[in-house]
């Protein structure tokens, strides 16, 4: 027993690999691809840069919509849920500004907006079950694929298959379950009250999540 303990204690540690050269090479490759794309189409180069930045932020922050809803029930942590609420608040400000500017100028409401219905419930249940089994949502799956997780690569394949299947049957769902007319709260309540209601609801969720996490 003494010999076993001694051998374990003196076992050499695995030498860590310096990843700085790999990171520098990857950064150079990303910049080079951006310049190549920019020569063909500047807008695509901008989207490339935004996509790389978003992926880096997601990976470093471990941001995942699945975890934001799963962690409060499994671990009691609500930090990601509060982060999602903050992200929605930020998006609300931006989208509200764009929509108000468009409506003020007499244009259509920008954005791909669809009314809720039974299709929303069915899709939410199916997607929620799939996210929990796969261990991540779309952003989380893509992030972990980049990190080399084999299970998430399998999830990505079926994610694509499911998306194609959904696109194929979208016309049937649209004609049978999706209403052609929706409710736009600013048209009913007015812009100030609608935006205030949105912020009050998000603030309530944030305070509740903070209380639950500190409990």
Image (cartoon, rainbow, N blue to C red):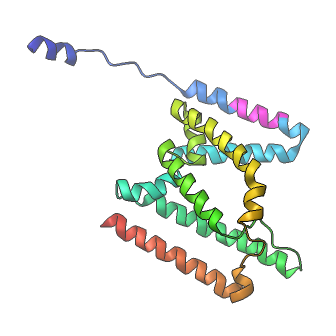
Residue at (54, 36) in percent of width and height: 152
The residue sitting at the left extreme is 2
Q: State the image quarter where residue 105 is shown.
A: bottom right
Q: What residue is drawn where x is 59% and y is 24%?
A: 21
Q: Position of residue 56 (x, y in %)?
A: 60, 43
Question: Is residue 99 highlighted in magenta?
Answer: no
In percent of width and height, residue 16 lies at 43, 22
From where the camera sits, is residue 46 visible?
yes
Q: Does residue 124 sit above or below 98 in this rendering?
A: above
Please name the residue shown 62% across and 38% down the image: 158
> In this view of the protein, can residue 77 be seen by the observer?
no
Residue 47 percent across, percent down from the top left = 77, 47
The residue drawn where x is 87% and y is 45% is 42
Say above or below: 99 vs 131.
Answer: below
Q: Where is the C terminus found, in terms of image quarters? A: bottom left
Q: Toward the viewer: 34 or 148?
A: 148
Give the image location of residue 101, x and y in percent.
81, 76
Q: Along the line of sight, which residue is nearer the eye, 29 or 174?
A: 174
Q: Tell me the chief SS of the magenta region.
A: helix
User: How many marks can you see?
Assistant: 0
Task: Tell me which segment is drawn in magenta.
Answer: 28-36
Is 72 situated left or right of 93 in this image? Answer: left
Q: Which quarter shows the N terminus?
A: top left
Nearer-the-camera pick, 172 or 201: 172
Is 33 colored magenta in this rendering? Answer: yes
Q: Pick whichever, 215 or 24, lies toward us.
A: 215
């Amino acid at each position: 027993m003494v010999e076993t303990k001694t051998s374990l204690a003196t076992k050499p540690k695995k030498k860590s690999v310096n990843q700085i050269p790999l990171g520098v090479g990857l950064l150079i490759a990303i910049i080079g691809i951006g310049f190549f794309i920019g020569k063909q189409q500047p807008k695509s180069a901008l989207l490339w840069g935004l996509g790389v930045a978003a992926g880096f932020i997601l990976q470093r922050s471990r941001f995942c919509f699945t975890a934001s809803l799963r962690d409060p029930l499994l671990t009691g942590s609500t930090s990601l849920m509060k982060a999602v609420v903050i992200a929605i608040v930020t998006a609300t400000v931006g989208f509200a500004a764009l929509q108000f500017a468009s409506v003020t100028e007499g244009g259509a409401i920008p954005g791909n907006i669809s009314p809720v219905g039974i299709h929303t419930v069915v899709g939410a249940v199916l997607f929620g079950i799939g996210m929990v089994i796969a261990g991540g949502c779309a952003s989380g799956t893509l992030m972990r694929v980049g990190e080399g997780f084999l299970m998430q690569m399998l999830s990505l394949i079926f994610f694509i298959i499911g998306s194609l299947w959904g696109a194929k049957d979208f016309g049937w769902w649209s004609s049978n379950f999706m209403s052609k007319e929706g409710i736009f709260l600013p048209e009913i309540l007015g812009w100030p009250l609608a935006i205030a209601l949105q912020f009050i609801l998000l603030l309530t969720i944030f305070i509740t999540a903070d209380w639950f996490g500190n409990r």
